[in-house]
Amino acid sequence: MSHVPLSVPDCPGTPSRDERAGDRPPFLHTGPELLAGALGRLPGEAVAEFTESWNDLPADAHLGTATPYRFRRYGRFRLRGEELEPLPHTAFFQGKDVNKVNGGVDRMFAPLAGAVAAGPALHTVIRTLRDHLPGPRAGIDTCGVHQIRVTASEGLDGHPAPEGVHQDGHWYVAQVLIGRRDVRGAESCLYDLRRQPLYRTCLTAPLETIVLDDRRVLHGVSPVRPAVGARTGTRDMLLVDFFREAG
């Protein structure tokens, strides 16, 4: 399968006048201080174990490329007040209407490592993100967690979003940068439902975060390429989907 590089139109750097006039903009972009402050209350070794777990992600078997450039794990939790209950491991599914590249099929990814799934760092991040959703929380009872590493090398770009400009099919989606090393690109751009650009940014600081209302905006990410003078590079992301479990 070949991937066409995502073309990201020019986007303004601030929410539009119409979005500011609404009750709440459909997204939130925060610096690292939000999650750093929450994680700062935990023992340092717990946070280190969490961030270092990105070095142990298996290759994504659903890319359809000869050489993998994306590595990931996936897990789901039931949200019960301040408690997170791990759910049985299952395939990740998106409809063709939201993912034209990999939609319509069950994608089985490796599960979250037990220490990560049960660790205080992930639970703290999820609870903090839930408290900063750009819209009502009523009815949300489930979240999906994706640990993703995208690599880039000479002659092989990494594609964080091979499906192009899209929605994920959830209520809210949080995108947390864990780290980027020796890469350029990976510019995030948000669009309204008419595909008009709303906001553009490049996440560069660890724990910098975008939380978006997946029902009100579309999003895309440009390819990842090695930084000038580097042969390879990596970009690590934590994605958390918030939704109501069907049924």
Image (cartoon, rainbow, N blue to C red):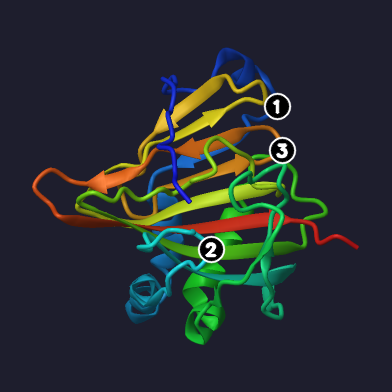
Q: Residue at x 70, y 26 (%)?
A: 23
Give the total number of marks visible in the rendering: 3
In this view, the residue in front, 233 or 16, is: 233
Seen as rendered, the residue at the extreme right is: 247
Can you give x and y, in whole percent of width and height, for residue 144 in the image? 64, 63
Residue 201, percent across and down? Answer: 39, 33
Q: Callout 2: 10 Å neighbours few (<14), some, many (20+)?
A: some
Q: Is residue 83 left or right of residue 149?
A: right
Check disc 1 and report its element: helix, strand or loop.
Answer: loop
Residue 182 drawn at (x, y percent):
19, 52
Residue at disc 2, secondary structure: loop
Q: Name the residue furthest left.
A: 229
Q: Is residue 168 left or right of residue 61?
A: right
Of mark 1 and mark 2, the one earlier in the sequence is 1
- Residue most toward the top? 17
The crowding category of the residue bearing disc 1, from other C-alpha atoms within 10 Å (few below 14, some 14 to 19, many at least 20), is few
Residue type at the position of mark 1: Asp
Q: Is residue 113 above or below residue 201?
A: below
Q: Which residue is mark 2?
A: 62
Q: Which residue is mark 1?
A: 23
**89 or 94, which lies in front?**
94
Q: Amino acid at mark 2?
A: His
Mark seen at residue 102: none
Say what amino acid the circle numbered 3 marks: Arg
Q: Give the foreground label among 3 and 1.
A: 3
Spatial distance from mark 3 to mark 1, Cα to Cα?
15 Å
- Residue at the image point whose x is 60% and y is 34% from the top: 218
Q: Residue 185 appears in which quarter of the rendering?
A: top left
Which residue does the numbered mark 3 point to in the structure image?
A: 215
Q: Quadrant of residue 87?
A: bottom right
Give yes or no for contact between labels 2 and 3 (Cβ–Cβ under 8 Å). Answer: no
Of callouts 3 and 1, which one flags the residue occurring earlier in the amino acid sequence?
A: 1
